[in-house]
């Protein structure tokens, strides 16, 4: 599952650079993070937070589901 962690870093960096389209592409590869996918993640809440920020910035209705 280390792949998700790297995608999360990529998404976060792209977001910070203002490149929302590419950040969203990384988020799309991360979602959905189901129970099986979270196995081995040390801190999935960090990944959810990055996804939330990107989705919220784009006005995507999926943002709210990242905070549940």
Image: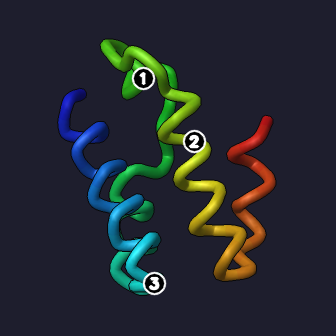
Residue 28 in the image: x percent, y percent?
42, 64
Comparing labels 1 and 3, the label whose residue is closer to the camera: 3
Q: Are marks 2 and 1 in contact (CB under 8 Å)?
A: no
In the picture, residue 58 is in which quadrant? bottom right
Residue receiving disc 1: 38
Q: Residues within 10 Å of mark 2 (few under 14, many from 20)?
A: many
The answer to which of marks 1 and 3 sits earlier in the sequence is 3
Q: Earlier in the sequence, mark 2 or mark 1?
A: 1
Where's residue 17, x and y in %? 38, 79
Q: How is the image coloured?
A: rainbow
* Closest to the observer, 34 or 63: 63
Q: Quadrant of the C terminus?
A: top right
- Which x, y percent locates residue 37? 37, 27
Q: Is residue 20 left or right of residue 67?
A: left
- Left or right, 42 with respect to 67, comes to left
Residue at screen point 53% across, 51% down:
50
Instruction: Please say if 27 is above or below 60.
Output: above
Q: Which residue is mark 2?
A: 48
- Reading the image, the residue beneath label 3 is 18
């Amino acid at each position: 599952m280390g792949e998700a962690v790297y995608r999360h870093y990529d998404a976060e960096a792209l977001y910070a650079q203002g490149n929302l389209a590419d950040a969203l592409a990384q988020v799309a590869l991360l979602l959905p993070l189901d129970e099986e996918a979270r196995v081995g993640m040390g801190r999935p809440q960090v990944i959810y937070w990055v996804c939330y920020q990107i989705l919220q910035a784009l006005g995507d209705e999926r943002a709210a589901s990242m905070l549940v």
